[in-house]
Amino acid sequence: MFRTRFAPSPTGPLHLGHAFSALTANEMAQTMGGEFLLRIDDIDRSRSRPEWEAQIYDDLNWLGLSWPLPARRQSDHLAAYTRTLNLLWDRGLLYPCTCSRRDIAEAVSAPQESPRVGPDGMVYPGTCRPEIPPKGKVPLDTALRLNMRRALAAVSTLGCLEPLSFKETGAGPASETGLITLDPDALVHDVGDVVLARREMGASYHLSVVVDDAAQEITHVVRGQDLFAATAIHIVLQRLLDLPTPVYHHHRLIRDENGKRLAKRDDARALATYRAEGKSPEDIRHLVGL
Ligand code: GLU
Ligand code: ZN
């Protein structure tokens, strides 16, 4: 079954960009006789609020969208993420990291090197990476990073000779489309050892999104171009965990009149603001170019 999803985080109001994403995912599902799912990405407990979640349901209903109930909420599946972290830990692919943002900034600002920026900001310089994988129980009171080099080695010894790749039916920021093949060297140097669990949060976005998309049997991930670079991480995790890789459809970003990306705090373009001004769902479609 063809299945798409819209996965907002309840950390602020939905704006025009979210509307575009949700409407696009829904339209693809309808066209294919498939299903459109909603998922509440509330893994970040410190920033998620029930009011924002309620507003998400309200805004999407107003737009005319519906989805099978109840929507999956990440906060209801924390055990599944912990299980997955354990699995990766037991295979020696994770290590604890105690670096602050500042530690990392200082480590990467060595005079001869210009800091590389990956999907999660500065590429981790490897300060805490151990020579030998740590043993024992997975520590849950510290951040955990994926050892990318070991992860790639593990993928290739899984007997999979196929290169790491995915199918893109939308486009990345540099118009990447079609079959996208990942370069292992780029994964090591330009993505690096990403965080899979945060200290106070448990699973990170990358880990939870991969677990969730598989659990919900999503066949087509529709989302903004800003997440194109992160897809490489998701493909590596899917291979490691023996999960299917969906088709990806990264869409253009909705910008304000100055060409700036809309941000969560950009209340002026919140759907609720447009509603309060008397705009209709049809007006919203026009505003985002649908
Ligand atoms: N929850 C993420 C966000 O709001 C989107 C996740 C995804 O579509 O993969 O940015
Ligand atoms: Zn560290």
Image: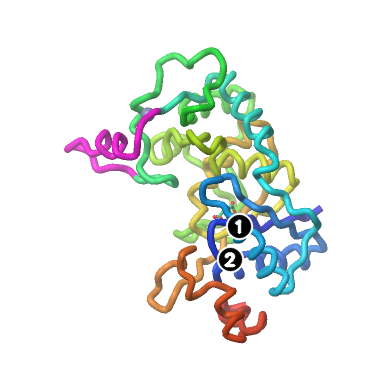
Magenta stretch: includes residue 157: no
On screen, residue 70 versus residue 125, left or right, reads: right
User: Of the residues shown, which amino acid type is indicated by label 2?
Assistant: His
Q: Which of the 4 image quarters holds residue 178?
A: bottom right
Secondary structure category for the residue under label 2: helix
Q: Which of the 4 image quarters holds residue 127?
A: top left
Above or below, 189 against 22 in this view is above
How would you rate the neighbour count of disc 2 (Cα within 10 Å): few for under 14, some for 14-19, many for 20 or more?
many
Q: Are marks 2 and 1 in contact (CB under 8 Å)?
A: yes
Magenta stretch: includes residue 105: yes
Foreground residue, 65 or 234?
65
Foreground residue, 112 or 265?
265
Above or below, 275 against 49 in this view is below
The residue under label 1 is: 8
Secondary structure category for the residue under label 1: loop
How far across and down, in percent of the image, does residue 95 sit? 47, 24
Q: Confirm whether residue 67 shows in the render.
A: yes
User: Of the residues shown, which amino acid type is indicated by label 1?
Assistant: Pro
Q: Residue at x 78, y 63 (%)?
A: 32
Please report the bounds of the magenta region as a residue range: 98-116
How would you rate the neighbour count of disc 1 (Cα within 10 Å): few for under 14, some for 14-19, many for 20 or more?
many
- Return the mark for residue 18: 2
- Queried on whether the Cβ of the residue with tag 2 lies below 8 angstroms from ligand 1, the answer reads yes
- Queried on whether the Cβ of the residue with tag 1 lies below 8 angstroms from ligand 1, the answer reads yes
On screen, residue 109 versus residue 163, left or right, reads: left
Q: Residue at x 63, y 30 (%)?
A: 82
